[in-house]
């Protein structure tokens, strides 16, 4: 199809979406890995090993939750407040959104898909309608991207919205940004038949409440095929640009990262035109050699005027990947290196990854295909490093504040002990305010009395009863000792009769 005709028909479709009312929103989250099944394993094998394979967690109270164990190799010392947000996927343990504390203990785990043919990505906390929410993509992977939808939950983990793209597009896994207007910036990968199949990047702004498409931008209208740094593949579409992050600037324009052109683009919100290119074949900036980047992710303007990003450096093992802070002089059109945070083990993150600047000046880095994360202080010292299993990556990792108040009650389990005194186990998936547990026990479900108070000790806390009891329950206590939740009573398992023969 002629590009001008395709351009006009696309704009007509976009205009109709504005005047015809709410658009059916189909969504997608996407990932940066090779294919739905075997391709995912192939993609992960491209990186250097980050260590041991993933180990699934096991909980007496929640046998349905088996997220990967997070090993904190460098204990937290001088870290910023908040929890660590991950979305591991792959084989070996349960995939899906995962919040852990500074010891690596789960705070909240949400299984999504099978980790290969269906999974979750881009998990983080944001603000919607003036309140904290969780957002993540869930859907189906394709080579290098995904097709799915974004989920928004409130602080009780109840789903309150779904973000799907309009105009017959599906949301990619790389990015969802909620704006102060309660709209969502989302991207899609759209294959267009030119003289050969080409996959372009599409950005939409969507009104979350109605699904209406408010803005749409197509890379083929503004970024030429000749800017691509990847060869044209045989027998499949050319993913020539590969968008992977969007940020709205203070002026309302869009800062966009494109991995397959090694460039950042400042997009004029009103016209869609590219105001400048930073990096790549047609850079408008002179980039200092030490500030050069390639295959990058997660480009963000910072309040101090720097631009941060994650420099993957290569799509194959070799050079050391780094999180970068760049000085960008838009008048002189020069870029300098302000700070670099290389991988502590000097390895290459061949795909995915993120770089977050924390309010106190620390930098939090998710190493993508390397299945680990690191927090650095402002001087570049490692103040925390965690790993969660080679071959089970998380596209991004964040440190974010979060208060979770689950609508579901705590869970208790009662098991016999080796010395005859039963052990009570307690957990409450997603409850961030629990500081201790009160154990209740008695001869019947309606005859329980307090027998012990114990401090919380990770996702699941175990407490031995002073004496055998037929029933038990637990009450969750906050920092002030107030009861904030109570489990249903559980009965001790029946004794196994001794073998008489």
Image (cartoon, rainbow, N blue to C red):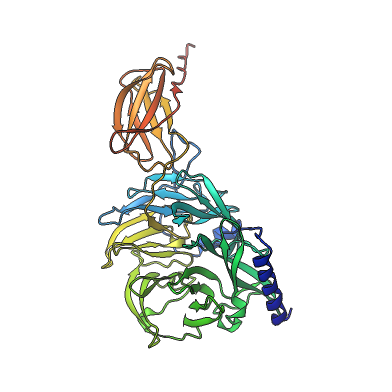
Task: Give x and y (percent) for residue 52.
Answer: 42, 53
Q: Residue furthest top?
A: 500
Task: Give x and y (percent) for residue 259.
Answer: 51, 73
Task: Give x and y (percent) for residue 478.
Answer: 32, 37
Front in this rendered view, residue 423 or 480: 480
Residue under the point 50% across and 82% down: 275
Residue under the point 29% across and 65% down: 361
Q: Quadrant of the N terminus?
A: bottom right
Q: From the viewer's perspective, tell me whether residue 122 is left or right of residue 431.
A: right
Front in this rendered view, residue 159 or 363: 159
**What is the number of callouts on the image?**
0
Judge whether residue 35 can be spotted in this image: no
Q: From the viewer's perspective, tell me whether residue 127 is left or right of residue 190.
A: left
Q: From the viewer's perspective, tell me whether residue 169 is left or right of residue 444.
A: right
Q: Residue furthest right?
A: 1
Task: Give x and y (percent) for residue 12.
Answer: 70, 73
Residue under the point 61% across and 67% down: 189
Judge whether residue 33 can be spotted in this image: yes
State whether residue 27 is above or below residue 1: above
User: Residue 26 falls in which quadrant of the image?
Assistant: bottom right
Q: From the viewer's perspective, tell me whether residue 79 is left or right of residue 431.
A: left
């Amino acid at each position: 199809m002629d590009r001008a005709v395709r351009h006009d028909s696309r704009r007509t479709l976009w205009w109709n979406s504005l005047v015809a009312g709410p658009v059916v929103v189909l969504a997608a989250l996407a990932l940066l890995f090779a294919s739905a099944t075997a391709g995912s394993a192939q993609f992960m094998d491209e990186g250097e090993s980050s260590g041991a394979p993933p180990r699934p967690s096991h909980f007496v109270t929640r046998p349905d939750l088996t997220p990967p164990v997070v090993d904190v190799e460098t204990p937290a010392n001088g870290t910023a407040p908040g929890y660590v947000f991950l979305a591991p996927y792959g084989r070996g343990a349960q995939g899906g959104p995962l919040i852990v504390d500074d010891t690596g203990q789960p705070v909240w785990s949400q299984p999504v898909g099978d980790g290969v043919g269906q999974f979750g990505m881009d998990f983080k906390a944001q603000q919607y309608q003036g309140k904290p929410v969780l957002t993540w993509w869930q859907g189906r992977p394709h080579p290098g991207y995904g097709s799915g939808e974004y989920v928004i939950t409130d602080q009780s983990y109840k789903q309150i919205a779904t973000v799907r793209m309009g105009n017959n597009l599906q949301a990619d896994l790389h990015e969802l940004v909620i704006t102060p207007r309660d709209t969502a910036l989302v991207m899609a990968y759209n294959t267009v038949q030119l003289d050969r199949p080409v996959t372009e990047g599409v950005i939409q702004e969507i009104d979350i409440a109605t699904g209406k498409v408010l803005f749409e931008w197509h890379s083929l209208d503004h970024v030429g095929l000749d800017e691509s740094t990847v060869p044209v593949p045989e027998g499949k579409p050319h993913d020539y640009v590969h968008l992977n992050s969007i940020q709205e600037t203070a002026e309302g324009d869009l800062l966009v990262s494109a991995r397959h052109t090694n460039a950042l683009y400042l997009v004029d919100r009103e016209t869609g035109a590219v105001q400048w290119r930073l990096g790549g074949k047609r850079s408008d900036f002179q980039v200092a050699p030490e500030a050069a980047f390639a295959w990058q992710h997660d480009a963000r303007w910072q309040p101090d005027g720097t631009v941060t990003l994650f420099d993957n450096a290569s799509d194959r093992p070799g050079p050391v990947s780094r999180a970068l802070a760049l000085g960008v002089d838009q008048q002189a059109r020069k870029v300098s290196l302000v700070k670099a945070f290389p991988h502590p083990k000097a390895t290459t993150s061949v795909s995915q990854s993120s770089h977050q600047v924390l309010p106190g000046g620390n930098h939090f880095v998710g190493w993508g295909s390397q299945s680990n994360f690191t927090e650095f202080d402002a001087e570049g010292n490692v103040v925390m490093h965690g790993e969660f299993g080679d071959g089970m990556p998380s596209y991004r990792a964040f440190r974010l504040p979060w208060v979770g108040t689950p609508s579901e009650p705590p869970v208790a389990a009662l098991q016999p002990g080796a010395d005859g005194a039963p052990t009570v186990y307690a957990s409450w998936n997603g409850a961030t305010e629990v500081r201790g547990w009160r154990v209740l026990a008695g001869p019947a479900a309606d005859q329980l009395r307090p027998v012990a108070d114990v401090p919380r000790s990770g996702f699941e806390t175990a407490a031995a009863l002073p004496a055998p009891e037929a029933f038990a329950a637990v009450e969750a206590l906050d920092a002030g000792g107030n009861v904030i939740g109570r489990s249903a009573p559980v009965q001790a398992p029946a004794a196994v009769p001794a073998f008489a023969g």
